[in-house]
Amino acid sequence: MSLSGKTAVITGSNSGIGLGIAREMARAGANVVLNSFTDSDDDHKLAQEIGREFGVMARYVQADMSDGQACRDLIAKAGACDILINNAGIQHVAPIDQFPVDTWDRIIAINMSSAFHTTAAALPVMREAGWGRVINIASAHGLTASPFKSAYISAKHGVVGMTKTVALETAEEPITANAICPGYVLTPLVEAQIPDTMKEYNMTREEVVRNVMLQRQPSKEFATVEQMGGTAVFLCSDAAAQITGTTISVDGGWTAL
Ligand code: NAD
């Protein structure tokens, strides 16, 4: 599968799933545009290293996905956008009657509205190029719920709905829109939660992983960022040209329960 000559823009890609997807896109030959809200030397170095490792053009473009205009500007600054991966996301856990209003607004903006803005800006670019892929990183929480994650779950369900709408609006064009719904993925963010949870419940690492984190993941294994990237690359293949407006769960059986 070669994505040579295509450009993939991946929001929130200086760590975790976004970075994993950027690497798999580059491995498949795509030029990549990495993004986050920071603008450090390390961010730019990360892009340079990916470019060197896979022999593609790789750039880092700073843009804050909580700002609609910045989302649209990211697409303009990317210069090309054949593949749009809406991945940036944050989480906050609190009962709904205690959920901070500004945090609700921020999660809806970063996890959902950013995909509206980037997609609106990217579709004309894809139409001009005559080919496009919109891939939204939703979640098992785009299809199911858990307590205390009202903003995240609302945003992820919203992203799944938006994905279907974009697919219908582009159905007769060589453009598809789909959502990947990961279960628990072992990213640095998740890894960092393990020591505290071990202390909180007086558990071993293995007990925390199996009984707390992967409680709802029947495989009892984390999904990996490489698997997310591989799924995204598949959605860009000819085999996936008629897959549009749907979700692909990569969740070790979570949504089968
Ligand atoms: P992460 O924290 O490692 O990555 C999130 C990325 O978003 C980072 O690159 C971060 O810099 C970026 N980001 C945050 N706020 C931003 C902003 N305002 N503007 C631009 N970028 C911003 O977390 P992750 O686990 O890799 O999550 C990536 C996506 O996958 C999220 O949408 C998350 O909801 C989703 N997801 C993760 C899991 C999991 O288990 N890790 C499961 C399901 C879905």
Image (cartoon, grey):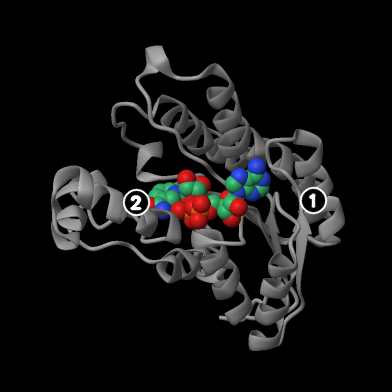
Side of 175 relative to 189 (left or right): right
On-image quarter of the N terminus: bottom right
Q: Which mark is residue 92?
A: none
- Image coordinates for residue 60, horizontal then vertical, percent: 75, 64
Please say if 32 is above or below 122.
below
Residue positioned 44% across, 66% down in the render: 225
Please say if 45 is above or below 189.
below
Q: Quadrant of residue 252?
A: bottom left
| Viewer-nearest residue: 172 or 87 | 87
- Image coordinates for residue 102, horizontal then vertical, percent: 59, 21
Tag 1: amino acid: Leu
State the SS at label 2.
helix
User: Which residue was labeled with disc 1?
Assistant: 74
Q: Residues within 10 Å of mark 1 (few under 14, many from 20)?
A: many
State the SS at label 1.
helix
Residue positioned 23% across, 63% down in the render: 221
User: Which residue was labeled with disc 2?
Assistant: 193
Residue positioned 56% across, 65% down in the render: 19
- Image coordinates for residue 55, horizontal then vertical, percent: 70, 87
| Viewer-nearest residue: 91 or 117 | 91
| Viewer-nearest residue: 225 or 247 | 225
Q: Residues within 10 Å of mark 2 (few under 14, many from 20)?
A: few
Tag 2: amino acid: Gln
